[in-house]
Image (cartoon, helix red, strand yellow):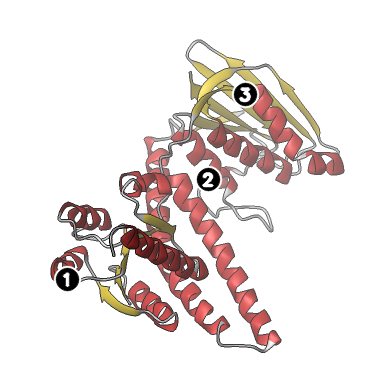
Amino acid sequence: MDNYHLSQTGCDLNERLDAISRLSANISHKLNNHLTYMYNYMFILKNNITDPAQINLANKIENGLNRIRDILQELIDISSPSLDNLVQTDVASLSEEVVQSFSREISERGIDISISGNATVITSRKKLLKALMNMVNNSIESEADKITISHMEGKENITISINDNGSGIKIDDKEMLFEPFFTSKQNAKGMGLYIAVQAIKSIGGTIALSSSANDKGAEFIVTLPK
Amino acid sequence: MTIMIVDDEPDIRESIKDVLNTAGYEVVAMSNGQEAFEYLKTRKVRMMLVDFSMPGMSGEELLLSLETVNKRPPALIITALAPWRMLKLLKYGIGYIRKPVNTKLLIGTIETMIKKEAANECAQPC
């Protein structure tokens, strides 16, 4: 397996992700102002129309604005430090919760998913859950039919490994993989792994990616300090 | 009834002014904190809407300065930032609304804050 470690490849990649994070937050702030402008005039417009067909069209425009708003909110929140409560977290239970939330997809696609080992860590449960959800979702979207989530507790760190036999990651895509809006999949937003890495970084952890030389299967390894 | 909007972004000032005008309010618009502070030294408004992040005097600095000289009208911070960043201001009873602004919520919040202030004023000898 090639190893592609975010914390080593560079300081380069980490610095780039930090720069992207700041840029995303700045752009989001600007765009939020323009969205406010549009919402305000949409409000005035809707108060001045009575034709149901026109009201329907105005509502469709507003739905589009809402979708933009939600993406921007995610970008701002994930880039900001947070005051989440830090709690003792049973990581295997958290993984169980993640698997449970994907039960429909797992059942429909006949995915063999297993969880092994355990670890506990004091961390932001909310951020870790968000990261795990996005990484497992990535494995499911890569058409894996076998996903293994394993946990290990060391003296100073805990590790969570999410290993799948899906379509893997092309060598050309590795540099871009964790950037927002990058995706090699149809109908995907391309935010999942960006959100995962930002969430893990914000709780002091790192993510490493291993994929096989023939680009099949992938393993994400999250390391969190105890 | 006059409401002040303080925001360095012209689109925000223009669109909020138009919305508040349709809701029956007069609006005075300021593009920076210093301008707003100077205005309020000698004149009163019913309420102010303040952008948190502005170059020069920030929204937070403006509101805390007005608080110090006892010239702060009821205020609503408008910002894209999460509420925990506003804790210092929220304890002064300053309201908070997140960008992008839900216009209906904005108007409702303004009405509520003005009514509450009027009720507080009459709780003292009228």
From the viewer's perspective, tell me whether residue B99 is left or right of residue A147.
Answer: left
Q: Position of residue A86 (x, y in %)?
A: 49, 27
Instruction: Give the residue type at disc 1.
Output: Tyr
Left or right of A152? Residue B90 is left
Front: mark 1 or 3: 1
- CA gap between label 1 and label 3 equals 56 Å
- Can you name the residue that lies furthest to the top here? A155
Q: Amino acid at mark 2?
A: Tyr
- Few, some or many residues within 10 Å of mark 3 (<14, 14–19, 20+): many
- Read off the chain for label 2: A
Residue at 38% x, 56% y: name it.
B95
Label at residue A91: 3
Which image quarter is the C terminus of chain B in?
bottom left
Check disc 1 and report its element: helix, strand or loop: helix
Residue placed under numbered mark 1 in the picture: B39
Direction front: furthest residue: B125
Residue A164 makes an appearance in the image: no
- Residue beneath disc 2: A194
From the viewer's perspective, is the residue at label 2 or at label 3 nearer? Answer: 3
Q: Amino acid at mark 3?
A: Val
Q: Position of residue A24 (x, y in %)?
A: 42, 54
Please, which chain is the residue tagged with disc 3 on?
Answer: A
